[in-house]
Image (cartoon, grey):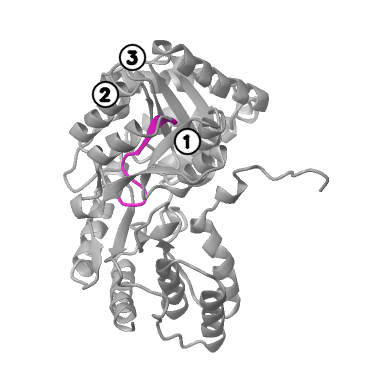
Amino acid sequence: MRTDIVHIGAGELTYEIRNIMKVVEKLIDLGLKVNFENIGDPVAKGENIPPWLKGIVSDLVMEDDSYAYSATLGIPETREYLVAMNNRRGGVHLDAKDIIFFNGLGDAITKIYGFLRRTARVITPSPTYTTHSSSEAAHAGLPPVRYPLDPENHWYPDLEELRRRVKYNPAVAAILIINPDNPTGMVYPKNLLQEIVSIARDFNLFIIADEIYHNLVYNGHKTASLVEVIGDVPGISMKGISKELPWPGSRCGWIEVYNSDRDPMFADYIQSIANAKMVEVCSTTLPQKAIPPIFGHPAYGEYLATRLERYERLSKLAYEKLEGIPGILVNQANGAFYMTVVFEEGRVNGNQSLPIANDPVRQLIEKLTTEEKMQPDKRFVYYLLGSTGICVVPLSSFSSDLQGFRITLLETGESKFAETIDTLSRSTRQYLASA
């Protein structure tokens, strides 16, 4: 091209959760049966959509205004409903103007980072959900700025290190929290959230909290929403219906803005995001209309409780089967529907492998792991896939220096899940022993 047309941060936009599907498609063509443990889609793992939820959506489909544009920031009645829900929790008082709808949180994430000044950075946890770290790095055209989550301490953040990295990096304008966490399944205790708010207050930062999994907490753990602890600090909470409900294809999420009136620069930044929504006209109408009748349905509470009970059982089962393997570190998931396994330092390298019975599959895996310079945990993921058909995601792809992998707790057939974890356990032992 006559002039460079590639965005300065284009190289930072990677998403291994989906990238591995390019390899999977080739392996399926070679006869491999794949067990997808890479994508957080409850429907793809067999979740049945409850009839009462289908009924709500079906009724809305018959209404003509479900096909129309909605208000730019979101349907007023839905925003008022969400405001009332939040104001019952206590904390910062919200108005409807403080809620902005998007076409899924991926859309919200892109705009929240994209409309920051390029030199303003958001410090993200490590490991972290790829869409956050990639989008933040892409907006800056630089590698992500990170703070560590500690697998030796329940995946809780190292707050002293967070404070140090904020103090000595004046470009940091905001702190990202994902609660419950993806990819680790960690749940932030209220006191940790309060301490992070204190750091933001001390350095005049704002907070971004991805709370899409906020109601998916189990194993007796408790947390708090950002609105309950943020006090006078500016902040943004991200929420949606694609995880709490089995409706990821709805692509419906929203942000709640806290204390925009406390800082004129923050207010201008939020206005720029709202202006961007005006250029797009609006977000998808139908799922917005569905939110009040779904959340207000008498069957909703019991339905959610049933899902949580299943995630709790599977998290315990996976932990019991994996935690005794020499060479790995595993924490029980207590929220969301993910669990992360870490390889102890030096336990994976570029020489290990697993037997692969299907010759064409073996040849492709050997070619990929030989020709492509890859992280050791990604090599494990490829050999696990070729050998067993189990598709997981390497931990290094979640903006992490640690080696490991993430699995999901979404399998609806518990005997099948147990079989998958047994196979994963045997293969992990065998791979580590092959060095």
Determine which residue is flagged by label 3: 93
Q: Which callout, 1 or 2, points at the residue further toward the start of the chain?
A: 1
Residues under numbered marks 3 and 2 in contact, where contact means CB atoms less than 8 Å apart: no
Kindly identify which numbered label has been placed on residue 228. Answer: 2
Q: Nearer the viewer, residue 108 or 51?
A: 108
Q: Is 176 contained in the magenta span?
A: yes
Mark 1 vs mark 2, CA separation in Å: 31 Å
Asked which quadrant contains residue 162, the reply is: top left
Describe the element under mark 3 as helix, strand or loop: loop
Q: Indicate whether 372 appears above or below 99.
A: below
Q: Considering depth in this image, is 145 or 336 the residue closer to the camera?
A: 145
Q: Nearer the viewer, residue 403 or 338?
A: 403
Which portion, as a residue range, is magenta? 171-185
Could you say which is closer to the camera, residue 328 or residue 66?
328
Query: In the shown orientation, is residue 139 left or right of residue 96?
Result: right
Q: Quadrant of residue 259?
A: top left
State left or right for residue 269 relative to residue 94.
right
At label 2, counting other C-alpha atoms closer than 10 Å, the crowd grade (few under 14, some 14-19, many 20 or more) is some
Q: Which mark is drawn over residue 56?
A: 1
Task: Name which residue lies at 60% across and 25% down.
Answer: 277
N-terminal-most mark, 3 or 1: 1
- Residue at point 32%, 39% (across, down): 179
The C terminus lies in which quarter of the figure?
Answer: bottom left
